[in-house]
Image: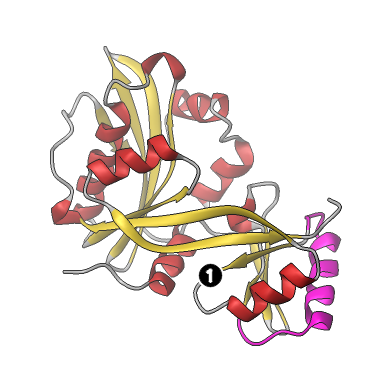
Amino acid sequence: MSVPDANALLAVLEATWPAARRIDAGPFILREGRNAGSRVSSATAQGPATAADVAEAAEAMRALGQEALFRIGPGDGALDELLAGAGFERRDPTLILAAPIYAIAGEAPPVTAFAHWPPLAVLGDIWTAEGIGAARQAVMARVAGPHAAILGRTGDRPAGGAFVGVAGEGAMVHAVAVRAPFRRQGLARALMLSAARWAEAQGARWIAVAVTEANAPARALYAGLGMAEAGRYHYRAAPGR
């Protein structure tokens, strides 16, 4: 099978990493992120927008205590031009890499990485140390569909982790983190393999991950697993933040 189009991938991303609240605001959907990062704090278009619509949405986002941030995905070329003309800066071009689960080769040794929920305290500590703090961990707890934490070990020591959620036939991996002393030893690959096997058992047929274009090491890891670009997006942020 082939993976779905970019819009379907983005829908699974949102289902497996949901905002605290979604707000309809004219041609935009606003997201209340509660300090959990751009993915859950950005606005997206649901129809053509004018400069006045952008200004109104930006003000509403600021009223939530967030910066004015818009996510630009497939079909948003006109909005991208509008925002660029208004001085909104382009930020964090991101790729969505995906593959059918059957194409993810290999099997993680069971003592290397295992799925569980809720996350063990030691995994929460690893995430926090790697910049995935309480606000982002709260996003995981909001996921309505099947989801799991993956704890990775190296030499019987807790060394890294990831989060995976399933929506329909798709799975999305988030929050992949490996502690510095244990990097480049194959643990991130083992985390992805464990996530794929768990997702397959939940009925998922394909798996994806979002990674910034600038993150060359992560892109190489995912490419080595057989994952290829299936979509992309970026953000536009208001000037003078």
Classify the position of the N terminus by image quarter. Answer: bottom left
Q: Residue at x 78, y 56 (%)?
A: 67
- The kind of residue tagged 1 is Gly
Query: Where is residue 208, by image quadrant?
Result: bottom left
Instruction: Tell me where residue 184 appears, x and y as whole percent.
Output: 33, 22
In the image: residue 86, left or right of residue 120: right
Q: Residue at x 82, y 54 (%)?
A: 65
Neighbour class for label 1 at 10 Å: few (<14), some, many (≥20)? many
Query: Where is residue 181, by image quadrant?
Result: top left
Q: Is residue 117 visible?
A: no
Instruction: Tell me where residue 213 appears, x and y as whole percent.
Output: 48, 49
Q: Residue at x 71, y 84 (%)?
A: 49
Query: Where is residue 53, by image quadrant?
Result: bottom right
Disc 1: which residue: 73
122 versus 230 height, above or below: above
Q: Residue at x 65, y 72 (%)?
A: 80
Instruction: Tell me where residue 175 appears, x and y as whole percent.
Output: 46, 41
Q: Is residue 135 visible?
A: yes
Number of marks present in the image shown = 1
SS for callout 1: loop
166 versus 214 height, above or below: below
Residue 230 colored in magenta in the image: no
Residue 50 colored in magenta in the image: yes
Q: How is the image coloured?
A: secondary structure
Residue situated in front as seen by the camera: 216 or 19: 216
Instruction: Tell me where residue 220 appears, x and y as whole percent.
Output: 33, 39
Residue situated in front as seen by the camera: 241 or 177: 241
Residues rendered magenta in the picture: 46-67
150 versus 37 height, above or below: above
The residue lying furthest to the bottom in this view is 48
